[in-house]
Amino acid sequence: MDRAIEWQQGKTSLEARRMPRGDRQGHRVRVGARSMALGASIKSGGAGTIYRLPDAPDQVAKIYHPHIERGEYAHKIEAMLELAPRLPAREFRGETVTQIAWPQDKIFDRGSRFIGFAMPLLDMGSTEELELMLQARQARAAGLNPTLGVKMTLAANLASVISSLHRQKHYLVDLKPVNLRFYRDSLYIALLDCDGFSVQGRSRRFPAEQFTPDYLAPEFQGRGVKPGKGREQDLFALAVIVFRLLNFGIHPFTGKPLDDRVPTDIPARIRGWLYAYGRQPHPQLAPSPVSAHEAMPRELRDLFDRAFASTDRPSAAAWADALSVYARRDSGRIVVCSKDDAHQHFAGQPCGAAKKFRYFFLTKNCTYRMAELLTLATGHDFTPEARLWYVPIELFYTLSDTRLDGRPLVDRIDYVPSSQRRVYAQFSALDGGEAQAVNAVIVAPDTALANAFGAWPEPRQQAMLDTLLAYYEYREAAARGESATGLEQAKRRALAYRLRLPVRESRVALPPTVAPPSKAHRTLRTGAGVTASDAAARSALYWAPYYRDDLSSLSPSVKALVVGDTQISMGDGNGPRLDRLDFVRLRQLRINAADIAGESTLSWQLQASIDRDPLAGDRLGPHGAGGIGRAWAVGTQTVGYALMSSTARANEAEWVTGPEAGMVWRGARLKAAAQLHYGYDPFAGETRTTMGARVALPIERDLDVRFELSSNFDAYSAGLNINRYW
């Protein structure tokens, strides 16, 4: 509580921390009627410092800082002494367990001025923050056992302690997991900083000033908790804590928005009563996909519905009664999971912890699942339904465009170079002889490294060995967990030899920085334009669910993938017709590819389509093409290539094979590509030459204008279109 007060008071408390407080250790004080010396300090907060009391080893003293207004605290502590909660005595392994650090005596200085109070000593070393139990991973990291039975026991004990406070009309108000502790062995709750509670005195109430919006009831959001309304606030916050304990830390007001009106922050959702886990689905907010609320008994779900969907909330006593039944081992209400004996679940219900995702390559892939988790964490919908499928690049766009509270959600998106790109960069930094020597070891891994590299000076040996080790790491990643004993042995030999070299700074060649895909246009294409040929001019519509061609690529090498690219035209007195459907177009132009043993340096392209063949009466038919060859960087903006290519059409038994040359130029704004194919068709017994050119002018990231021209010297076609990407 002291930490919360200190944080929320902002500048005032920071200035207060600079004030000289003085170490009171050894000072004589009066505790009730007894005089005793203060011992060593234990901790200090925004309001006061905790000291040991050597003459009363079962107690500690809280001494308020000199700048604190102590008069009001004196009245409040007096009320707390008169109306202490009646908590039942708890014992564990023969020792009494202190559940609440409630004041036991006032403390005065030598001038009989009130300066603090004495309270029971809590063995902090035996306790942990309740916050740790909300997530299984952090609980296990702290050596805790986050089973359902343990969390149910903690929830029941918490409700019991709060019920005892409520019977005396005392309220915590700022009730949240980080303000609660529990004993690791006994699972009893430990309440600290009780002088920050809302306390009922004989004739007046002493309010609590602090609260946390994520645990604040809907009726108090934006208004604060009025004096006397602390019970309603406690019951709401208690239900939130219990829900999170039993449901993997999920807050009951998080989930997946079903429309654009849903706020992104939890307090606003609480204010709007947007509870997603009720027995009746909420029309605006769907549950988190990892929630196990449907595996809870109806009795508990009804209690949660009352707590979060109405102001008629269950009392702390009602929660304690309901939860304690499930917490008893002999009740049989919680059983061990049949699939994993580390899991527990409610009897007669499926195991929420063993719940598995259904995985689909297109609609429910790993990127989609990551987006669902981000939706859960932030409240923003990262899984739009507008896409034909949820390809990984969609998440890049959404992350880049999302703003929360007026600020970008992410500062930037960086590519982490793959192990393949790292080893290619290091190989490219070697000279011809060095690369040849490293390749010789890759081909014959039993080669003595001293013989293979010994002719080079030590700095170059170091670079060669670093490159060899990078290659082994790349191959290990490619093995994907398969047995690679020989590879591991070769890597150990290389590492041992590398460690024998003198220690010096290593300057490893790094791959060039690659812009994230979110810098390029989105991938769903729609477009409109006009086409013209030697036969007629027509208007055209374009659509592709995934369109990332060679003019869109941002990587140094040219990579293109187009799926389902469709062109429909209208004109010359006829209705709409399908001109072209590219099922898939692929292109990989590798530039500056290192010559690594076993690694391909070839570039390639592939196309499978149906389109209209001008040499076959403009009839629609299948069309396939492919090619393989090499590519080179020409300056910083141009990639040139030479391939041996083939193209085939079924309408006229056409199959043209021959060399193809081309270039892709990508300037700061304008982008262009051109190609020339000269081939021989054995069916027709003649040579054919085709050429083409494309120009793209981006207007903004997701809008461009394109001009396309193609010719086979017997016929030509040209098109101008504007495209929008979604």
Image: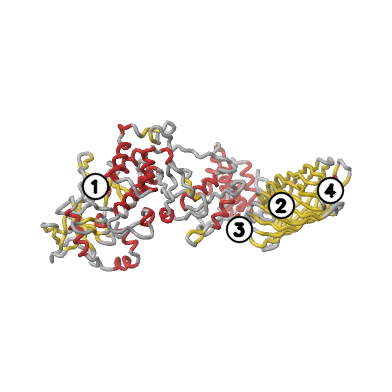
Badge 2 amino acid: Tyr
Badge 1 amino acid: Ser
Q: Position of residue 403 (x, y in %)?
A: 51, 59
Cα–Cα gap, marks 4 and 3? 38 Å
Q: Position of residue 471 (x, y in %)?
A: 59, 47
Q: Nearer the viewer, mark 4 or mark 3?
A: 4
Secondary structure at numbered mark 3: helix
First in sequence: mark 4 vs mark 2: 2
Residue 464 appears in the figure: no
First in sequence: mark 1 vs mark 4: 1
| Label annotation for residue 386 | none
Q: In the rendered image, which residue does mark 2 sit on?
A: 542
Mark 4 crowdedness (10 Å alpha carbons): few <14, some 14-19, many ≥20: some
| Label annotation for residue 519 | 3
In front: 324, or 179?
324
Instruction: Determine whether label 4 and label 3 are within 8 Å by CB.
Output: no
Q: Position of residue 121 (x, y in %)?
A: 21, 51
Q: In the rendered image, which residue does mark 1 sit on?
A: 164
Secondary structure at numbered mark 2: strand
In the image, taking residue 309 as reference, residue 427 lies left or right, namely right
Q: Answer with the quarter of the image where residue 707 lies.
A: bottom right
Q: Position of residue 336 (x, y in %)?
A: 38, 33
